[in-house]
Image: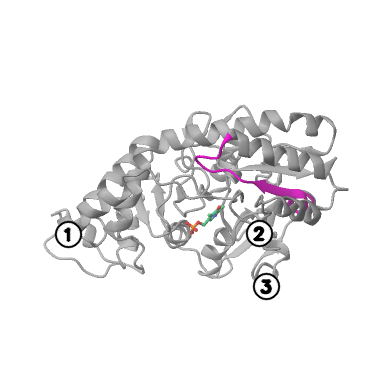
Amino acid sequence: MKKTTTNMIPFNRPHMTGKELYNIAEAHFNGRLAGDGPFTKRCHAWIERRTGCHKALLTHSCTAALEMAALMLDIQPGDEVIMPAFTFVSTANAFVLRGGVPVFVDIREDTLNLDERLIEAAITSRTRAIAPVHYAGVACEMDTVMDIAIRHGLKVVEDAAQGVMSAYKGRALGSIGDFGAFSFHETKNVISGEGGALLVNDPTQALRAEIIREKGTDRTRFFRGELDKYTWQEVGSSFLPGELIAAFLWAQLEEAQSITDDRMASWNRYHAALGPLEAQGRLRRPVVPETCQHNAHMYYVLLSPEIDRQAVLTALKENDISSVFHYVPLHSSPAGLRYGRVHGSMEFTDTQSARLIRLPLWVGLTAEQQDRIVKVLTSVVT
Ligand SMILES: *Cc1c(COP(=O)(O)O)cnc(C)c1O
């Protein structure tokens, strides 16, 4: 019998605000399609105002923003960057592209973020930077990370791909370290298909960031009328998106608060509904420390270790619910083994990543759909 898919609850459904095509039509009408046009400028101003970063620069992805950060830090072959292995590949790839060596440190049992208590012991004479990843939009313990960085003369690149609209002690994620990287990929909260931004927090680094982003030239200053010609200044690349992407993104940024509010309502509904399963020891819900204002990027649960995760995912799928796991930790991946090294035990990276499943979470997910998800999950784990 052919299975109907009309009841399927997707894992993610990109949210459109309704204004994207109007903005794209306006950019089209203006006939100004290359990067750094009026929509890009609006997006930059929004990010700077909302996060308090010194300078925001749109990129074509968070991956590109991380690669820019590695160029900004002049990472040389053999330079070490301390990071979690429980992250997306781009955190590591950006530095490996410059010959850097990711040094993987374990995550905290509670937030699944880089364990700040393990960073200092991983520092060597080759360490140049720390790359904390704010998993699920929940902040790393940034006071400790920044204190270690300052005492050891290290730079901090925040992978805030998942952290748009999140904060740590009232400070926007991405605005705390030397650099921050946002993602606007369609799987994130605020989207442009592919897209990202580099947040530059040290004012002395802003001009150089503009140069690296514009193929290594000072073209951005030239366009501002500060120079009468532009020339090749540095090693750089083309990291900026065209105006159509920025036009799309501007519609999303204007709705960032309502997007966050809608997701937060669903997040809170899951959290309340799954309390009893946590009390029964069947799973563990996400932990959000009081210092963190999160953005409801993700709702995940950590299944009790004796539960067969694949069986749970299969059962959800048979009930038309699409759920996924991640990440396969980088330290045990083929490239991670080749390019990185591990410092210390990876106990929680290994145990927590093997237990985790992510539940559907997107703008427009209904209470009825969530009830169905919780009901099916409850029946398979108890
Ligand atoms: C999504 C994500 C990225 C990559 O973002 P892109 O915009 O797709 O390049 C990097 N790091 C983390 C932690 C992510 O979640």
Is the residue under label 1 in contact with that under label 3 (CB below 8 Å)? no
Q: Quadrant of residue 229?
A: bottom left
Q: Secondary structure at mark 2?
A: strand
Residue 235 pos. (x, y %):
36, 69
Residues in magenta, as a range? 349-366
Q: Quadrant of residue 303?
A: top right
Say which amino acid is labelled 1: Phe
Q: Residue at x 20, y 58 (%)?
A: 28
Residue 216 pos. (x, y %):
31, 67
Residue tagged by mark 1? 222
Q: Nearer the viewer, residue 2 or 354?
A: 2
Residue tagged by mark 2? 103
Mark toward the viewer: 3 or 2: 3
Q: Is residue 119 visible?
A: no
Say which amino acid is labelled 3: Arg
Give the mark nearest the N terminus, 3 or 2: 2
Give the mark nearest the N terminus, 1 or 2: 2
Q: Nearer the viewer, residue 155 or 221?
A: 221
Say which amino acid is labelled 2: Val
Q: Nearer the viewer, residue 226 or 382?
A: 382
Rendered view: 71 above or below 197: below
Rendered image: mark on residue 338: 3
Distance in Å between CA atoms under marks 3 and 1: 42 Å
- Determine whether, in the image, residue 126 is placed left or right of residue 157: right
Q: Residue furthest left?
A: 228
- Determine whether, in the image, residue 272 is placed left or right of residue 249: right
Q: Quadrant of residue 299?
A: top right
